[in-house]
Structures are given as C-alpha cells and as structure tokens.
Image (tube, grey):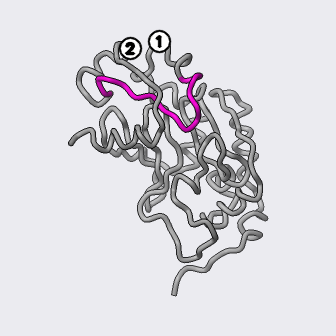
Amino acid sequence: MGEIVRGIAELVEVDDPGWPVVTDAIGAGGTECVVLPPDLERCRATLLQLQVTARSLLGAVVLNSGGLVLHHGWLRVYGGSGGELPSLAEVNGFPAQFDPAWAPQARLVVAHDVLGGVFTLDGSGEVVYFGPDTLEQVGLGGGHSQWLLWLLDGGAETFYAELFWPSWQEEVAELGLRDGISMYPPLWSKEGRENIAGTSRKAVPMRELHSLHLGGEA
C-alpha cells in the first residue's frame, strides 16, 4: 500500500505555521529579500501535490509566496505560484492535476542562482548544491529550514564571496527572473575561475544555462 494522502485542509490548517518564522527572518534584515505575490489557488495546488504541511518552511514558502528573490536578485527561491519566476511546480514538472501517485524522480529543485547553480532537496531531506564553478553536487549538511534561515541571515554573502565581481549588482538588476548569466571562459574553467571580472558575460535563459553546465565536462 502507498502512503496516506493528506488533503489540503490538513496541510494548511496547522498549529505553529512556518510563514511567521520566514517573515520574521526577512524583517531582521540579514539580506535583501523580495517576496513575490502569491496566486493562492495555484499555491494550494502546489502544496497539495508536494504533500508537506505549512508548518515546515518549505510548505510555508509554497503556500504564501510566488517565490523569494534574495541578495539583490542573485538567488531565487521557488514558491507555490509562478509568473516572472517559475513556480516550484513548473521547475519540478508537477502534473497539471493532482496525482496522488506522483513524486519527484530524484531531487526536488528549490532554488537557483544567477550563475546557474541549483539547490535541491535529496531523499534524506538534505539540501544539496550544484555549483557552476565545479560542476559538482555538494551536500550542505542541513535541511531546508536551516538552509533558508541561513540565507535570510546573510549566508549568500559568504557562500558566494569568491564569485562576485565588481559590477555584479548592476548586471543582475537587468535580468529577468527566468534568466541567468553565462560566462566565457566558463566559470568551471581555470581561466574563468581565475578572472571572473574579465570574463565575457551575457544574459541567457536559465534553461539554456543549465544545459551548458550539464555539457561542460563533455
């Protein structure tokens, strides 16, 4: 027998919901964060398919936002409804209608950065990062709530410290939320890593950027 499927009321109507924890962390001002407005119906549909409660910070972000845009646009955390930023459902290929038998095949993608780095949740609940500078998957040693609160407390500033270049904020500000920055020489090359500011950079769709990284070692 499969796992018991929970209805939307059971997922939404919880004691100690996680959203106030998220908004308090945003209000503390550890990093700049924009909350994209939610489409409530689509958010609830995404939460239902995800089968996590709004008590968790993952469920809270899905239910209450169209996504979070952190650190001057450098990092995008997926919410429950899409628009300028894709939704968690779109990125992970959720079925158009609720399917109790469906689950993500591998890792659940929860965020990406402008260079094409991807944050995922693995089967154990650990957040894993795919780095565009290494083309490797690295476990971050904690779950989604710990990771999100760390980011909202300014974690991106240190995590990406070696990848920022002098004009990054101006270049990121010109991007759409479905776009990223492609570099040549690529960031995973010796030349790219040693002189990021000297690379040739252009805006490309995020899907194209991910395809380039997947073929980077070929």
Query: For this rendering, which residue is in front, 198 or 10?
Result: 198
Query: For this rendering, which residue is in front, 39 or 55?
Result: 39
> Who's the residue at 71% across and 30% down the image?
28
Mark 1 or mark 2: whose residue is earlier in sequence: 1
Mark number for residue 131? Answer: none
> Who's the residue at 34% across and 46% down the image?
137
Q: Is residue 142 left or right of residue 53?
A: left
Residue 132 point in image, percent of width and height: 36, 35
Are the residues at dot 1 and dot 2 in contact (C-beta closer than 8 Å)? yes
Instruction: Specify the quadrant of the image occupied by residue 133.
Output: top left
Residue 26 point in image, percent of width and height: 70, 34
The magenta segment: 172-186
Q: Is residue 80 above or below residue 150?
A: below
The local crowd at label 1, few if under 14, some if 14 to 19, many if 20 or more residues have their Cα within 10 Å, is few
Q: Give the residue number, with chain letter if any, for mark 1.
A: 166
The local crowd at label 2, few if under 14, some if 14 to 19, many if 20 or more residues have their Cα within 10 Å, is some
Q: Give the residue number, with chain letter if any, for mark 2.
A: 197
Q: Is residue 205 left or right of residue 185?
A: right
Residue 72 point in image, percent of width and height: 60, 25
Q: Secondary structure at mark 1?
A: loop
* Residue 167 covered by magenta stretch: no
* Residue 176 covered by magenta stretch: yes
> Who's the residue at 41% across and 61% down the image?
106
Give the Cα separation between the discs numbered 1 and 2. Answer: 7 Å
Instruction: Name, please, the residue furthest toward the bottom.
Output: 1
Q: Is residue 18 left or right of residue 91?
A: right
For the C terminus, the quadrant is top left
Q: Is residue 36 above or below residue 47?
A: above
Q: Secondary structure at mark 2?
A: helix
> Who's the residue at 36% across and 43% down the image?
211
Q: For the residue marked with disc 2, what is the amino acid?
A: Ala
Q: Is residue 18 above or below residue 52?
A: above
